[in-house]
Image: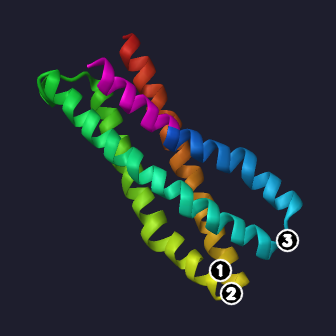
Amino acid sequence: MMLLKLIHLLSVLIWVGGMFFAYVVLRPAAVETLDPPQRLRLWDAVFSRFFNWVWVAIVALLISGVYMIYLYGGMAHAGRHVHIMLALGLLMIALYGHVFFAAYRKLNRHVAAQNWKEAGEMLGKIRKLVGLNLALGLLTVSVAVIGMAL
């Protein structure tokens, strides 16, 4: 059980921590120091690396989370906080799927074609969605910690 919790926690740290770093640290620094074409190229390269890690984190979260629920006797025996965490986690995965399959792929194509205006618009959409997913991630972590304490 301890190994499953560790895998789960590390996966959360990779995903939510990566979003926090990107949103709160990298984004403002890129805006301050780079012209739009360089900034868009940077984000395209950052996303291509980070999103690979997010996929790994999602798979690890789903496997470890579902297996821990199984070990606790199923959802009928899980605390309310587990139900909330699962719902928020599935919402985050759906939102991430939209970011990856719709917004990021368009950003990637626009950057490759040097369509800077369109790429900038897509980056703006991604920024808002990542901000929402970050808020959901922080809420989920809060639910986990508070729920375990009750």
Residue 44 against residue 140 in the figure, above or below: below
Residue 9 lies in the magenta stretch: yes
Is 21 situated left or right of 144 in this image? Answer: right
| Of the pair 127 and 106, the residue shown nearer to us | 106
All told, the count of numbered labels is 3
Ranked by sequence position, the earlier of labels 3 and 1 is 3
Q: Which residue is drawn at the image coordinates 43% and 29% (left, top)?
A: 9
- Kind of residue at disc 1: Val
Residue 37 against residue 129 in the figure, above or below: below
Q: Which x, y percent locates residue 97?
A: 40, 62
- The magenta region covers 1-13
Q: Is residue 56 visible?
A: yes
User: What residue did someone put label 1 on?
Assistant: 111
The residue most toward the top is: 150
**How far is disc 1 from disc 2 in space, using C-alphas?**
6 Å
Q: Secondary structure at mark 3?
A: loop
User: What residue did someone put label 3 on?
Assistant: 35
Q: Which residue is drawn at the image coordinates 63% and 65% (left, top)?
A: 45
Q: Which x, y percent locates residue 137?
A: 49, 40
User: What residue did someone put label 2 on?
Assistant: 115
Ranked by sequence position, the earlier of labels 3 and 2 is 3
- Kind of residue at disc 2: Asn
Q: Which x, y percent locates residue 136?
A: 49, 42
Q: Are marks 3 and 1 in contact (CB under 8 Å)?
A: no
